[in-house]
Amino acid sequence: MADELMATVMGLKRVVRRRLQAGQPGPRLRGAHTELLRVVRRTPGIGVAAAAKELHLAGNTVSTLVNQLIDKELLRRETDPDDRRAAKLHLTPAAVKRQDAWREERTKLVEGALAGLTEDEVATIGNALPALRKLLAELGGEGTAV
């Protein structure tokens, strides 16, 4: 069951990403870039070390991602006024706009696909969501998908 669950979840994510990437403005982003942007959106002002911990990545890996996203003008780094050695991360307006557009298009795509299912199938998926969230929490995830 674990293999089938993971294959299905990863397949859904991959299909949605492929369908939506073509219409995205600006540079294509890798999954790690997108995940970092989601973390920063959820926690504006988060530091690199805290973001690395949340993403289960090495600090130097996240630092590299931060620099790449700054170069793409999707992230900005501010010096922490309480600790001049630390930085706080924030999304740029372009990143917010990009994420909002992605969410809107993702919602349309998935709602359109759900409309092709029976009421019972949609209800089954809806009823499975709390258990899937609990599974995510058990695995050490953030608990909610963005």
Image (tube, rainbow, N blue to C red):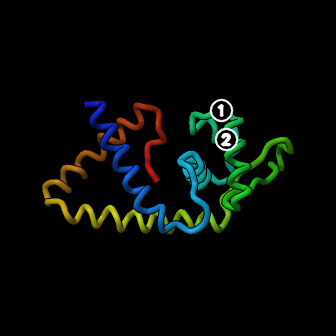
Q: Position of residue 54 (x, y in %)?
A: 58, 38
Q: Are marks 1 and 2 in contact (CB under 8 Å)?
A: yes
Checking the image for residue 62, the label placed there is 2
**Disc 1 residue crowd, few under 14, some 14–19, many 20+, Cα 10 Å:** few
Q: Amino acid at mark 1?
A: Ala
Q: Secondary structure at mark 2?
A: helix
**Disc 2 residue crowd, few under 14, some 14–19, many 20+, Cα 10 Å:** many
Q: Which image quadrant: the N terminus?
A: top left
Q: Is residue 62 left or right of residue 98?
A: right
Q: Position of residue 137 (x, y in %)?
A: 42, 36
Q: Position of residue 71 (x, y in %)?
A: 73, 57
Q: Amino acid at mark 2?
A: Val
Point 72% across, 56% down: residue = 70
Point 48% across, 68% down: residue = 23
Nearer-the-camera pick, 114 or 129: 114
Point 34% across, 37% down: residue = 6
Nearer-the-camera pick, 74 or 71: 71
Nearer-the-camera pick, 61 or 40: 61
Checking the image for residue 58, the label placed there is 1
